[in-house]
Image (cartoon, rainbow, N blue to C red):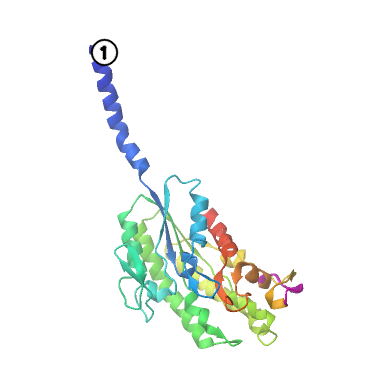
Amino acid sequence: MRFKTGLTAALAVTIAALAPAAAQAAKPKYYLSLGDSLSVGWQPNSAGVGRETSQGYANQLFALKRRSIANLRLYKLGCAGEDTASMLGTGPKTFCQYTGDRRIGYSKRRKGSQIAAAEKFLRGHRGQVAFVTIDIGANNVDSCATGGTVNVACLNAGVAAIKRDIPKISKRLRAAAGRNLVIVGMTLYDPFLELYFDPNTRGLAVASPGLAKQVNQSITDGHKRNGVTRVADVSKAFSTDVTTQVLYSGPLTNNQPQQVPQNVERICRYTWMCVLKPVGPNIHANATGYGVIANTFRPLV
């Protein structure tokens, strides 16, 4: 009887010692996704109306990483239409509302900001966040090329805002996350390459990768110099600077094979830019393009 009693006591002590470790292991790990419409998988429906989908890069990256990170959960705070200023809760644009560390919906009435929600989540889940991704800056410049021309003043203002705001965003994320948490930004692809198919706007398409390089350098510098040291090169993954001629056929070529630069072919393959109305042209990635973005992030997280 004494032996059994002693054994029971020993087992109880062992179980008690293991309980905290088991409880810790059972806690979820989070992938925190931040950004604009790309981060929420925005795509047009058959009527050309944009909406969030489950095919975005965050969802696809989550599916890839959950195989290697036990109990991983995806927590999305991204907001369609967000630019660098609205993410900080400043500037004229307001799209998403936040309460605490949650996004509660879209509205033109300002209530909270994405950066504040992200800070609250990161501080409230120290030790439970596996990694963070962020895409931001596209909405600062996407409206600067219309009708086959570039509004230089608009572009310069957009780049200036990126240079001003992304360092603030990066610093705040790093301060809230701590020194060691992996936070990864991303460069942008060039939707204006679609203008290649119209002889009247081809010149802008040819020039646009140079403009994209300027924007992407500002994004990369703003991140890397201020605590977000990893940046997924989505521009490279979309072959933005590759002008080797390849065959392409689609709606804009009447489905007839045509020689086009590879960067043009990729923008047609990975986005809705080369789709006819009412669905296109739309700057957002399709499911394939979002998959390319996810796989560009993958080795960095």
Instruction: Name the residue nearer the viewer: 45 or 145.
Output: 45
Whole-percent x, y for residue 97 in the image: 33, 71
Q: Is residue 238 left or right of residue 158?
A: right
Q: Is residue 3 visible?
A: yes
Q: Is residue 68 left or right of residue 27?
A: right
| Residue type at the position of mark 1 | Phe
Who's the residue at 67% across and 80% down the image?
196
Who's the residue at 33% across and 37% down the image?
21
Instruction: Name the residue nearer the viewer: 72 or 217.
Output: 72
Above or below residue 211? Residue 175 is above
Above or below residue 20? Residue 256 is below
Whole-percent x, y for residue 245 in the image: 75, 71
Q: Which residue is mark 1?
A: 3
Who's the residue at 29% across and 63% down the image?
100
Q: Residues within 10 Å of mark 1 (few under 14, many from 20)?
A: few
For the N terminus, the image quarter is top left
Q: Which span of residues is magenta-colored?
A: 254-263
Q: Is residue 57 magenta?
A: no
